[in-house]
Every structure is written in structure tokens, then in C-alpha cells.
Amino acid sequence: MLTKEEIVQLLNPVKDPFLHRTLEETGGVKEITIKEEKKHVSVKVGIGKTNTAEQMQLQQEIVNILKKNGATTVGLRFEELPEEIIKKYQPAAEEEQEASLMGGSKGTKFIAVASGKGGVGKSTVTVNLAMSLMRLGKKVGIIDADIYGFSIPDMMGVENRPAVRGEKIIPVERFGVKVISMGFFVEDNSPIIWRGPMLGKMLSSFFKEVEWGDLDYLLLDLPPGTGDIAMDVHEMLPTCKELIVTTPHPTAAFVAARAGQMALKTDHEILGVVENMAYFESKKTGEKEHVFGQGGGQKLAEVLKTKVLGQLPLQQPYEEEDVFAPSIYQEDHPLGKEYHKIAAKIVAKVEE
């Protein structure tokens, strides 16, 4: 049967989930009681914050350690550590948390690409804005946060999967842009049936457990609307700025206004509106046909007190024999040039 000294040695390396210090450093192992005849161990543990999901995870970790080493049953009680201990380690824990968000890069600018409804080309705008920022010499990453409708890997022609180094996930790099997506962790295009809290945890992992390195810009392709994921982004990234995508159709613009109003209510600065599928230009006549109507982008910008950063026509990227990236517009493509202008406006606004 385990002795008290052995139990202390087993639990000392375990980390407090809030202070990110070992129980040995915080003096977290408070009391140990052993009932040898029943092989029962009771432990009182002090941590930075009690009655949380993290406490439940820690409880499971400690129970598993003790049972693997001879205890038949384990009883655990948790209490909050003394204030002086919490104050001693809290600043370092917060600093570590901030660093973990982007692997130590504090100069990263976050831009969420949002829309009120699906099918307006929000993901296409995300990947091409990322490419244009990269062409402007910026270090760029994309989080495909559209958990149910992930499409970024397919749009960029990504065929690899992320690697794991230690406890960190290494994002896939394509055309110089780093990418992480729910699509990398789902087999055979299976449907996602997770609920809100689980999705929020996955999104949090994309920030904390991915080794992004130093980035100038991290773009988030949000799900359409104003659901759980959008709310999580607003809470996790208070400095995040937003780009709203719509089509010229008045209904699309009306619905997109909801996403914009949510950004304003949570003090997220709106960088502007991108009107996608603005028109179709005939190669034969040069005449512009407004297939989806007119004026939606401008009306939306007026409601949100911002500007239309660009109006993008309906057009396919050039076909390239050796490169598979079905949604990326080349630098010399007319739309590639339009995205370049939008990216330049965003850089001027964000870095002024």
C-alpha cells in the first residue's frame, strides 16, 4: 500500500490548472489520510480556483495516478489556496496564458470574417485576404472556426494534416499561410454533432494548443450568424476586429447587419464590409450584370457606420496545371488585384 511520502512524490509534479505551477511549488497537497485495510486514500488539495471544469479534470488526473499506484478507492477534497500564494503565481499564470494563445507572439492582430448567413463567400474572402496579406509581406495564419461548415483546407488545396510536437499541434502551411481547421480532425467528412460548450473548448484549443509562432495577422473564418462560436470569439478575443461579408441582395445585407451589430455591442471594431458576388462582367460585351441585385453592401455599411472596402465580381480563378487550390485567386488575376486593394486598406487601418 502507498505511504504518505510516496503519495506526496506522486502528486508533487501535478500542475495547478489555474496557476500553471506544480502542487509542490504551490504547497497544494494539504492533507493525506490512508486506510490500509481498504486501500483507500483521501487527499485534500489546494488550487487557485475551485468548483470549475478544470477542477474536475484535475480530480480525474489525481484519481488515475493514485489508482495506478495501488489505491483501490480515492477520496478528494478541494479548497482554494491562500490569497498570498495565488497573488504570487497569478501574474505569471496570466502571462503564460497570454503567451500560449499565440505561442508568445503579442503583436498578432486578430481579424474575424463574419456574415449573417451562409453562402455569401465568407470563406473565399478569408483565404484570399490571407493570401493578399501574405503577398504584402505579412506572416499570416487562418483558424477555420466554422466548425460545422469547415471548408478552408479544400479551398486552399491542403492535403497534409497537422503534426504534433510534444504537447503542441503544428499547423499546416500552404502558400506561406498557416492553417488549422476542424476538418483536419474529422474522418471522411463526418457530420459534427457537438454542442456549444464542446465547440467552445475546441476553439480554445486552436488558440492555446497550436504552435503558431510569430504571426502578424490571424484570420478567423466564423460560422454564419451570431451563435455560440461567435460569442466565444467575442469573449476570448476582446481586441479582435471584424470584417463583414455580404452579397448585394438586400436580404443578405439585412441578415448580415445582425452579425455587425453583435460586433458593435461587444466593442469589436468593424473594419468594413466586403460585397461579394457584386456583379458578373461579360467577356464578350464587357457589360456588367447585377445578378444578385444592387446596393446591399452600401446599405449594410451605412447601418454599421463603416465603409465598403471592396466589391468583388463573380469570376473563377485561373486554372493552373501543377497547383490545386480551387478558391485562391492568383496575384495577377483581376480578383487577386481587388483582394490586394482590400488587404492594403485593412493594413493601413489596423497599423495606423
Image: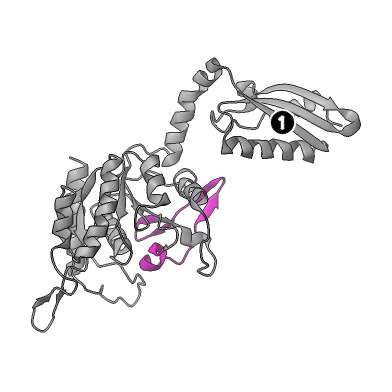
Residue 209 falls left or right of residue 12: left
> Which quadrant of the view contains residue 38?
top right
The three-letter amino acid code for the residue at tag 1 is Leu
Quarter of the picture containing the N terminus is: top right
Residue 307 visible in the snapshot: no
Residue 69 falls left or right of residue 251: right
Q: Which residues are magenta?
A: 151-178
Q: Is residue 105 above or below residue 171?
A: above
Residue bearing the label numbered 1: 76
Q: Is residue 174 magenta?
A: yes
The residue lying toward the viewer, choosing from 265 and 289, is 265
**Residue 84 location, x and y as percent?**
53, 15
**Residue 274 location, x and y as percent?**
20, 58
Residue 202 visible in the snapshot: yes
Callout 1 secondary element: strand
> Which quadrant of the view contains residue 58?
top right
Local crowd at mark 1 within 10 Å, few (<14), some, or many (≥20)? some
The residue lying toward the viewer, choosing from 187 and 290, is 290
**Residue 96 location, x and y as percent?**
47, 32
